[in-house]
């Protein structure tokens, strides 16, 4: 087979791919075996475990991930692209970078994220809001597992964060603090105050704490 070169700018550096298609497939198979991905490494695993090239090199050479998997002798299915764990990690990372949930359009336009259809299929829903709700519940459970808060403790913690910021925290900021272990999850807060309106919660906290002061 004749060698062909493909180039891609990655982080402002030009990478020249000199391997033939057969050599790339051999590299992919060897890499998959090394990380014990017995049906072939996923795109996420290529990035995570440091494959020599990005998945886009393979996609440009072979046209689709299905062709990559077939050429390597693996079975192609949805999980060949991503696992649910892969999707979860990618979405949470993107959310942390943005500081908020991503919209459907943002998901579809980001080349580093699975398309909306793939995300929804893994979470067995037709609404992206349901996906974010599930992910955030998982974050909250992880961050507050084993912790129990009284109403007074919740008020004190909220007021402490208010003083640190100099203003009431948004729901997204509360979620971030929950991940850091500095605040209980928003569902715990809602339950104690018997409301999901964050403005009403802050009104109660500030009226009580400021009056005491």
Image (tube, helix red, strand yellow):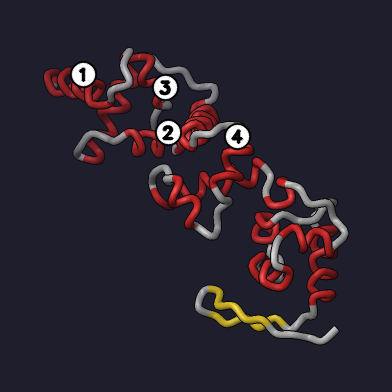
Helix, strand or loop for disc 2: helix
Q: Nearer the viewer, mark 4 or mark 1?
A: 4
Picture coordinates of residue 120, whole percent (x, y):
57, 38
Q: CA distance from mark 3 to mark 2?
A: 11 Å
Neighbourhood count class around disc 2 (C-alpha, 10 Å): few under 14, some 14–19, many 20 upward: many
Q: CA distance from mark 4 to mark 1?
A: 36 Å
Q: CA distance from mark 4 to mark 2?
A: 23 Å
Picture coordinates of residue 153, whole percent (x, y):
34, 19
Query: Residue under circle 2?
Result: 178
Q: Residue at x 86, y 83 (%)?
A: 1
Query: Residue under circle 1?
Result: 204
Query: Residue under circle 4?
Result: 123
Q: CA distance from mark 1 to mark 2?
A: 20 Å
Q: Nearer the viewer, mark 3 or mark 4?
A: 4
Query: Residue under circle 3?
Result: 187
Give the mark nearer the N terminus: 1 vs 2. Answer: 2
Give the mark nearer the N terminus: 4 vs 2. Answer: 4
Residue 133 appears in the figure:
yes
Quarter placement of the C terminus: top left
Front residue of 32/67: it is: 67
Residue 9, image quadrant: bottom right
Residue 124 vertical placement versus 100 (above, below): above
Picture coordinates of residue 40, whole percent (x, y):
80, 55
Give the mark nearer the N terminus: 3 vs 2. Answer: 2
Neighbourhood count class around disc 4 (C-alpha, 10 Å): few under 14, some 14–19, many 20 upward: some
Q: Nearer the viewer, mark 1 or mark 3?
A: 3
Neighbourhood count class around disc 3 (C-alpha, 10 Å): few under 14, some 14–19, many 20 upward: some
């Amino acid at each position: 087979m004749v060698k062909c070169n493909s180039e891609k700018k990655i982080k402002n550096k030009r990478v020249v791919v000199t391997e033939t298609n057969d050599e790339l497939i051999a590299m992919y198979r060897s890499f998959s075996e090394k990380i014990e991905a017995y049906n072939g490494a996923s795109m996420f695993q290529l990035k995570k475990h440091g494959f020599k090239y990005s998945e886009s090199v393979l996609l440009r050479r072979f046209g689709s991930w299905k062709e990559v998997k077939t050429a390597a002798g693996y079975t192609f299915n949805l999980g060949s692209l991503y696992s649910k764990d892969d999707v979860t990690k990618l979405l949470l990372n993107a959310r942390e970078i943005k500081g908020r949930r991503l919209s459907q359009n943002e998901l579809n336009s980001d080349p580093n994220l699975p398309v909306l259809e793939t995300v929804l299929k893994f979470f067995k829903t037709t609404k992206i809001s349901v996906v974010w709700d599930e992910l955030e519940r998982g974050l909250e459970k992880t961050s507050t597992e084993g912790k129990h808060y009284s109403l007074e403790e919740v008020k004190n913690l909220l007021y402490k964060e208010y003083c640190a910021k100099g203003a009431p925290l948004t729901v997204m900021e509360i979620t971030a603090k929950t991940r850091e272990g500095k605040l209980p999850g928003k569902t715990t807060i809602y339950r104690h105050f018997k409301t999901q309106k964050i403005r009403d919660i802050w009104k109660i906290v500030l009226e009580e704490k400021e009056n005491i002061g």
